[in-house]
Amino acid sequence: MNIAALLKRARIVSRIRSFFDERGFIEVETPVRIAAPAPETNIDCPPVATGGFLRASPELQMKKLLALGMEKIYQIGPCFRDGEKGSRHNPEFTMIEWYRRDSSYLNIKDDITELMRTLLAEFAPELEARFQEITVREAYLKYAHWDPWIENDHDRFDFDMATKIEPAIKAMGGGVFLMDYPPWAASLSRLRGDVAERWELYWNGVELANCFSELNDSKEQFKRFEIAREERRELGEADYPIDMEFISSVEAMGLASGVALGIDRLVMALLNISDISLVRA
């Protein structure tokens, strides 16, 4: 714990709130204990003794608000993941997520670029606010020498991401958007042909944010959840129930997009701090 860092963190979070308030976003608060997390293959939510799980993300609950008609929303709050501990990971962490109706992942890309430029100017003016982008296909062809669209190898994809792609992104320096994922890595994102409209933002090689043009096909969403549940069962992980209220609300979102940005890692990047424990109370 670092008191000077915590004081700056408070100012950074306050500035983030004002950034979204000034742009007409509404701050919302959704439950931290939920009955049915999104069944993602490699993300484990801590179970609660009295029932349910601590959320890894407020994503599903916030999308339900979009489906009810809310237009531009954000939330800053605690999230939890089992089995994650290290200099960049903590079992409890803070996330900001924001969502827009009638938008795509490119609109959110503009949002986060403007937010980052604002925060860098105010809290880290010595850092160059430089942003580049590279597609997943370009990155794998250039640095790993294979095409994930031709070879559907999930394990190789993850291994090369950690050992080849992310080091190359770090060498690019500053902010880098890794754009357009293969369809089998779409997660909850919408497809455009054989491309998933998804990007991740890295700052000096550290992943900060994950964004989707949101999938709004209820049948496809149910299918993807069932595939993820089967993968979790094969790995011996907890089998999460499917949130059918979410599935039934998916199509009412219309065209929408959203992003999850880790506050702790963002503060680390702005303050040039390498250990997450120094930016949390």
Image: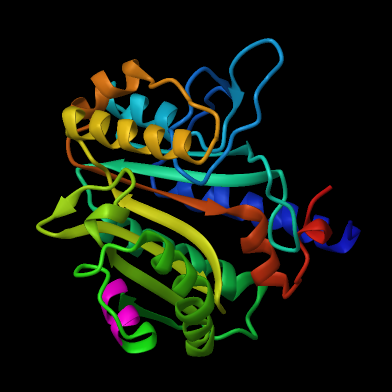
Residue 272 rendering spot, x and y as whole percentages: 72, 75
Q: Residue at x 69, y 10 (%)?
A: 50
Task: Describe the colour scheme in one phrase.
Answer: rainbow
**Residue 170, relative to residue 245: is it above or below?**
below
Left or right of residue 255, residue 124 in this image: right
Vertical placement of 48 versus 264: above or below? above
Is residue 43 visible to the viewer in this orientation of the structure? yes
Mark count? 0
**In terms of image quadrants, where is residue 156?**
bottom left
Is residue 124 shown left or right of residue 106? right
Of the pair 108 and 23, the residue shown nearer to us: 108
Which residue corresponds to the image point at 64% horizontal and 50% vertical from the top-left? Answer: 14
Secondary structure mostly seen in the magenta stretch: helix
Was residue 215 drawn as part of the magenta stretch in this picture? no
Residue 42: image location, x then y, percent: 51, 46
Give the magenta range.
Answer: 136-141
Left or right of residue 136, residue 218 in this image: left
Query: Quarter of the image holding residue 131?
Result: bottom left
Q: Is residue 161 above or below residue 241?
A: below
Picture coordinates of residue 151, whole percent (x, y) = 25, 68
Q: Residue furthest top?
A: 50
Residue 209, x across and y down, in percent: 48, 58
Is 137 within the magenta?
yes
Residue displayed at 48% across by 25% down: 240
For the question of whether residue 117 can be seen, the reply is no
Asked if residue 22 is positioned above or below residue 79 in the image, the reply reads below
Q: Is residue 161 left or right of residue 237?
A: left
Which image quarter holds the N terminus?
bottom right
